[in-house]
Amino acid sequence: MALKRCCVFAHFDKENIVDPYVLEYLDALIPLVDKLVFVSTSQLKQCDIDRLCQRGIDVKCRDNSGYDFYSWKVGLEALNLDDYDEFLQVNDSCYAPLFDLDTIFRIMEGSECDFWCMTQSYFYKRHAQSYFVCYKGAVLKCPAFRQFWKDLVPIKDKKQLIVAYEVGISRILIGERLKMESYFRLSPVAYLRALPRNLKLKISVTRNFNPYKYLRALFLSNPPFHFYQEMLAQKVPLIKISLIKGIPFSTPPTNLLSIDGINLETIRLIYNHQKRIGSSPRAELWIAPDNVEE
């Protein structure tokens, strides 16, 4: 029997629009889900709302507080989880699809895990990075999972939010003996091979007077930023907007157009979005502009 999957997509745009890159991401998700709820903390124009509704998307607008986790909570409140086999939480912090998304789901459906993410992090404690997480049936039935969302309130401090919610939900589920997996996996050999590159990158921005925390920060990595080359090699279909923008640090760029099988429409939308937000000089290091039609 086919799985019934619901999705909540968290959105924010300073100019209060739904950028074409977001629409492309949504269009890639729609065939994979039975219900998609789009929760925005922007003051969307009616024309953008209409574009979403025409795609069969349920649109919710709310005040800009609580970051994406509160948007996911608002979206969940519009759903009855008892009607679904899986819940997918996503946000607009990535460009997608660089490659086929459907392939990822086919692979992870065959996994015996209870929830999976595109990337995992070991900062603080091992946890699913919240920008793309899929929770399976055992999680949806777990009382602790439902209580987590029921108790969730807006948190202003982003670091506190990451510890309480992004790390917190993973630790709660792992504590319930539910198994987590990450689609992107890095071998010890690949980690060691990339270590000199990442130490050079992090040593200029990592600051802490506590020697243990300083060394830990140097050797623990944030995969979408420190291992994006390896992610591209594994055909991970997402790439972080802030990576190309150069925030929080400027990573060595890769010519995306040189990668076999990459989605050229996504590349075009990346360039146009970076141009709209004023980062096109940086984006041109990733994308040869002469090869991209605006």
Image (spheres, rainbow, N blue to C red):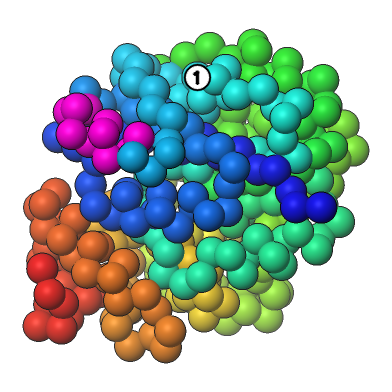
Is 68 above or below relative to 241?
Answer: above
Find the magenta span and give its range.
44-53
Q: Nearer the viewer, residue 65 or 97?
A: 97
**51 within the magenta span:** yes
**Amino acid at the residue labelled 1:** Val
- At which x and y percent is residue 35? 55, 37
Considering the whole magenta stretch, tell me its main secondary structure.
helix
Give SS at disc 1.
helix
- At which x and y percent is residue 194? 53, 76
- Say whether residue 19 is visible: yes
Is 143 above or below relative to 163?
Answer: above
Is 69 above or below relative to 206?
Answer: above
Q: Which residue is mark 1?
A: 74
Q: Nearer the viewer, residue 19 or 206?
A: 19
Residue located 40% across and 54% down the image = 27
Q: Is residue 166 left or right of residue 97?
A: right
Residue located 84% across and 37% down the image = 138
